[in-house]
Image (spheres, coloured by chain):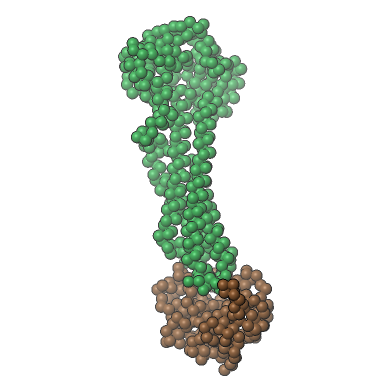
Amino acid sequence: MTKNLLINLAWRNIWRNKRRSAVVLSSIIVGVAAIISMDGLTNGMTYQRLFNQINLGTSHIQIHKTGYTDNRLVKNFIQGELQLKADILRLPGVKAVSERVVTFGLVSSAESSAGIYVYGVDHKAEKRVSAVSGLIKEGNYLSGAEREVVVGYELANKLNAGLGNKIILMANDPSGKIHSDVFRISGLFESFSSGFDKSYIFVNSNDLQNMLSLGNSYHELAIIVAEPSLAESLKGEIRSAVGSDFEVKTYRDILPILVMQIDLSRESMWIVNMIIGIALVFGIINVMLMTVIERIREFGVLMAIGLSTGKLFSLILLEALIIGLSGTIIGLVITGLIHIPFSYTGIDFSWFSEGLVSLGVGAVIYPVISYQTVLLTIIMTPMIAVAGAIYPAIKAIRLQPVAAIRHY
Amino acid sequence: MEIIRSENLDKIYKDNGVPVQALKNINLTVKKGDHMVIAGPSGSGKTTLLNLLGALDKPTSGKIFFEGEDISKKTVKELSGLRLNKLGFIFQAYNLIPVLSAIENIEFSLMLQGKPEALRRKLSLNALRDLGIEELANKRPNEMSGGQQQRVAVARAIVNDPSVVLADEPTANLDTATGSNLLDLMDEMNRSKNITFLFSSHDPQVIERARILIRLRDGQIESVQTK
């Protein structure tokens, strides 16, 4: 027998009606699993969307000539002689930097044409900054060879062009003159975002610089840092290093809507969690009320032999707490066991929603469970169970021992 | 030594809004070592009186003194403490806690008194031994006969050395032989340990053993016999 007979009594009371306890335990387990799984999926989706955007080109920090981001004019370029890249690479926490020539242009094949963003990149540096080189499904990424271009499958389909085919790229130089050049498709990529696949093409930076008469100038310095959380602090350091002629922006500045959506989805998760919590409270009230009604006579006896109303109140709350704790622990273990393999393999939603790809999330979502949610679930669920038992416990302590003992 | 004294005790119930006089002008005294039986036909007010004297219910008017102290105005918490420390109860339907074993049922009130585990165990085993049911220590109520359960209930009632044990129709659910054995045991405890017993019953076996017999009729004391 345990040292505390009251805990022992509470534990055994829970199991006197196994079926009912199993039902309430199951509802808590399902509630915990729902909260954690929803959190995992929402986090996975939002982080993936952000991660994909960062990896597809946004990077952690971007530097442009002041005013460039207002209208993205080709003439707002950064002089190559400034050696900004070397200065930034020296800063602690900076992992990789890529210089990019960026412009808007028109790409044409023999059959069709499309408006696109052209990125002129140094293929070696860009590989360390963006994930596009890893998304090549056919052919090869840029190698530095003359007039090679990498395009997305969706754009290639639209142009009715394939690997090895020629396409013509037209764009304005800094003075506004239109230039064109012929490029040969060396690789076709497929990313997690259909919008990206049909709107972005990649060429070697020197080809684009030559075409637009830019010399060794470029428009964008894309920076990857060791940890995304470092971006905000490094932004200040970089700004002091490069001076006021340049604007320094983190991914949070560049993707404000996405960041807002992430914050919003986190907040909306609390509403969902609250609804699940309220449902749990009512389930527990129902079960604990049944438990109290069934045991009126027993409570009468306990009060007759000297159990105070305070201890009776505690006994009922203790039973709810044990159910709440047990349900939380079992729910967390089951959710964890399901989550671990999915965090590696991901969950394929391609049969379910094509919208995820157009949103830039990708069809396969890798759930990410936040420790804050787990911690909060561990604290809140047993508290919810106890809250659900308060009303039945009040009913119990209001019983008159004499009437309760006579109850059948 | 006086343990319980009632003065002009009245109890009026409301039955569907209609007042019913359950007890009227009850005056009695229970002294240390008494073996008192409150007898009477059904509806005479036996159980109501036992409940009032056992601090389970409050009178409509009149006073109850427990060891000289008026308990009529005590709070719910104070009455609970009084029942825990000074009173033992035996019910007609045994009323053991179904999820606890015999020894745990006996230990329960000792635990509520805050006695240490080792002492609880020792006192509970002693009580079981006194009732001759030591071998039932780890059995749960559903594994025991009615007579065995009522013996455990007696052990539970006496284990914390109460001033008085109140037994409400303790033999009503037992066959004659089992009831007689149980009453013999309680008689023996009354004599050898000077435990005060206050019964309510209309069982002749209980009535014939009473040293003080109080007969109730229609909520009033009809007669008091002392043997």
The quarter of the picture where the N terminus of chain B appears is: bottom right
Picture coordinates of residue B181, whole percent (x, y): 45, 86
The quarter of the picture where the C terminus of chain B appears is: bottom right
Residue A215 in view in this figure? no
Image-based side of A142 in relation to B220, left or right: left
Picture coordinates of residue A303, whole percent (x, y): 56, 70
Q: Residue at x 52, y 65 (%)?
A: A6
Q: Residue at x 58, y 68 (%)?
A: A308
Towards the viewer: B115 or A138: A138
Q: Quadrant of residue B15?
A: bottom right
Most distant residue in the bottom direction = B227
- B93 relative to A95, above or below: below
User: What shade does chain A have?
Assistant: green
Q: Residue at x 44, y 82 (%)?
A: B174
Towards the viewer: A352 or A340: A352
Q: Quadrant of residue A360?
A: top left
- A192 relative to A247, above or below: below
Q: Residue at x 44, y 34 (%)?
A: A45
Q: Quadrant of residue B58?
A: bottom right
Picture coordinates of residue A143, whole percent (x, y): 37, 16
Towards the viewer: B213 or B182: B213
Residue B20 in view in this figure? yes
Picture coordinates of residue B226, whole percent (x, y): 59, 93
In the rendered picture of this protein, how many numbered marks are placed on residues? Answer: 0
User: What shade does chain B have?
Assistant: brown
- B49 relative to A259, above or below: below
